[in-house]
Every structure is written in C-alpha cells, then in structure tokens.
Image (spheres, rainbow, N blue to C red):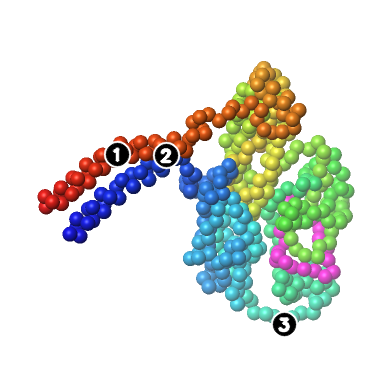
Amino acid sequence: MKREQGLRRLAGLTTPLLAVGLVALLVPGQVAAQSCYGGYCGSGDGVDWDAKVEVTVTVSVVPEDAGFVLINGEEPEHGVFTALQGDTLNIEAVAENGYTFVRWSEWFDESKSSVEAPIYNHKTLVAHFAEEEEEEEELSPSAPSDERTSEWIPEGTVARDRRGKTLADITVDIRQPRALPSNGVLVGDVYDFKPDGATFDPPLPLSLPYDTASVPAGTDETELVVALYDPEAQDWIALPSVVNRTNMVVETEVSHFSEFAVMAPMVDSATPLITPGFSFSSLSVSPATAYAGQDVMVTVEASYVGANAQAKSLVFVTLNGEVADETEIVLSPGDHVKVALTVRPPQDGTYTVELNGMADTITVSGSAPASALTQAVALVETDTFAPLDAASPSVLARWRIPIYIGAALLLLLLVGPMVSVLRRRILRYRYDL
C-alpha cells in the first residue's frame, strides 16, 4: 500500500515539475552567482550587486593562539571570511597578552597591524606574532633607549612607541610607493620608518638623500621637499624642508614615523606616471575603424604585483602622444581588473593609441551617419540625453512575459498526455506486481 502511494505521489509531482522547468528555461533570469576560473574573477562591473562573485580570505595566525584577526570588525568563522568582489576590507591583527604583532604575509607584506585592502580574488593571509620581550627599567625621557637608537634620537628627545613605552629599536625599509603624488614627482626611494606609531617630542630631525640624475628636467634642486604619505588621502603631503646641496640630502623634522620620500614639484608638461608594481596587458581598441568624432573604447587588463596591502595608480591612454583619457584604480597584490577608457579622433587619418608601452591604431574615415548627426544636434538643442529616434517597443517586447507564459502553457498541454501515459504505465506496473 505504501509503495502504491509513493508511486502515485511521484506521478502527481511530474507535471508541475515539468511546468516549472519549462518556465525557468523560457523566462530569462538574473544569474545568482558566478564562478572564478584559475584564481581570477572579473571585476564585476556592469552586473547587479547580487550577481557579483563571492571571494574568500583564508586567515591563519603564527604561532597559534598568539592573537587573532578581525575583518570588518568580525573574527572569520573557521578562519574563512567571505566578501563580494570589489569590497574594501578593514583587517586588524590583535595580539594576545604576552605577544606583539610583527607582520602580514602571503596576500601582502605589511608591518602595520591595521590595514585596508580591496579584494577581487580568493586570498590567503597570515598574521605573524612574536613573544614580547621582558620590560627593561624605564629610562629617562631625555636619554636614548639603547645603542640602536642613540644614533637616531638626539639627546633630550622623548621617543615613544604606540603603547607609550620608551622606543627600543628603529628600522628602515625601502619599499614601493603605495601611490604617486597628485601634486609632485617622487625622486628616489620610499623609506618606511618603523616601528609604526612611534612619536617624538620635540620633532625628530630627518634627512633623506637624493640623486641629481633623478631630479626632473627643469626643476631646481632647492625646490625639493620631504613628503609624508597619508594613507587616508592616498596621497603625499609636502613637509617644510631645507635642501643641503653639499651633502645632497633634504632635511625636515617629523613628530611620528611613517613613509617618507623626496618629492619634486609637478612639471606642467610632464607625462603622467604609473605607480610601480602595476602592469597592463591585452590592449583592445573598438572599433578599429571609426568616423571623425566617434567615441572609440580602449580596454586593458590591469594588475598589481607589489607587496602593499593596497596601491593606487593613474591609468591613462594617449592619442598621437596626447593624453586623451585617464582614470584611477586601487588594487591589492595579485588582483587584476579590466579598465575601459575612451578616445575620440577628431578627423580623418590614422591615429596611434598607446597605454603603458602598448600600442594600437585607429583608422578614421568619413563622417558620422546622418541619423547620428541629427541626434547630436537635437541633443544640444534640448540638453537631454534621451534617445531622440528610439523606435517604439515592438509587439514582442511589450508582450514578452505573456508570450513566455503562453508558450509554457502550450508546451504543458503537449506534454500533459505524455505524462498521463507515464502515469498509467507506473500504475499498471504496480498491479502487475
């Protein structure tokens, strides 16, 4: 008896399931999720928010139980945090008692315990901690903490770490810039002074070297300054400085540690620069043949292979040597996105499009079609962006949903008899048993 009821229930469910399947096939729907292939996911541009790819950060701590990691204020469940492509994550390492944070590895190489990083692909991140050294007897504020800092800190300067303790050590790393200055040109290396958060009272004298060969043409050496990187603005801030041309250094005073570099003023005629660590590939121009004044799209794949948690770069395209369009992108290590720019050749001829050493050509011939010219004139007169000669919706477009439903019902009527035959055969099979 139970077997008969199960067979009847199976046969009864067949019809509605087929109907649902037919409607799902006929009515176009939004893709709920996408996949990443080979560790690469697209930027997600041009798709609805709920259709963007989910990506994960797998977090671990070394040594275990030395601390934990918070992402957007939450501790990842089972060491895995899920985000949407293009999200910017606030990542913080928190040390347990007796330990101190040292650095991040894998995804990026940073010594700051709290960083921000955009994410486009699946990532692995390791937080490294170390046991705290036994506290030594507090020294007089006017005395350097030990021999390692005596050459840096003048007598009478109070030097403290982020916890307010006497500064015990100073290190300097040379690293790639996180971004290029919007109002200047970096001259030489970027110096990352550590520990992060160290403060000095009164301000600490700081001298950075420069190479005359790196000074932009037309720039007087006396115009060089020491610049401080501001992570909030993702830009460089010029500090009051003095140039010592004899020793070829630029001198300033700083009240806290950060990343510093020598900066020259921007030259008006200078070509924009790409931030080190960014690379570009797969240049594409569409259409390759255009009419005068037509917008031509230039696309390129941009990626970042540096060590910074996030880096910003200007992306620009030139048309016959002149900058035609530009935009800014922010990426983290290992990420890559598609960047689209637009150029507009003004008249007939062959034009060269260049982007970071890659080049292509556009052939321009003739003028715009009459319909395009009519729309352009009308748009200027009406000051609106609405299409002027857009065709009325077709009958198919207006009745699309009813047509889909009707087609599904028609197929259901055709499939109905087949379902009935299947149903009778199932029941007959039961009785034959």
Give the foreground label among 3 and 1: 1
Residue at coordinates 77% horizontally, 68% vertically from top-left? 199
Q: Which mark is residue 137?
A: 3
Q: In the image, which residues are magenta?
A: 186-209
Foreground residue among 330 and 430: 430
Foreground residue among 69 and 370: 370
Q: From this viewpoint, which residue is outermost toward the bottom?
A: 137
Q: Dot 2: what SS?
A: helix
Q: From this viewpoint, which residue is outermost toward the top?
A: 366
Amino acid at circle 2:
Ile
Instruction: Tell me the quarter of the picture where residue 131 sits.
Output: bottom right
Mark toward the start of the polypeptide (3 vs 2):
3
Q: CA distance from mark 3 to mark 2?
A: 83 Å
Residue at coordinates 69% horizontally, 41% vertically from top-left? 327
Q: Which residue is mark 2?
A: 405
Instruction: Tell me the quarter of the picture where residue 26 sits.
Output: top left
Whole-percent x, y for residue 198 in the image: 74, 68
Q: Is residue 424 left or right of residue 330?
A: left
Give the foreground label among 3 and 2: 2
Amino acid at circle 3:
Glu
Q: CA distance from mark 3 to mark 1?
A: 89 Å
Whole-percent x, y for residue 433 in the image: 11, 52
10 Å crowding of disc 2: few (<14), some (14-19), many (20+): some
Q: Is residue 29 left or right of residue 260?
A: left
Residue 280's place in the image compared with 66, above or below, is above
Q: Is residue 194 magenta?
A: yes
Q: Which residue is mark 1?
A: 415
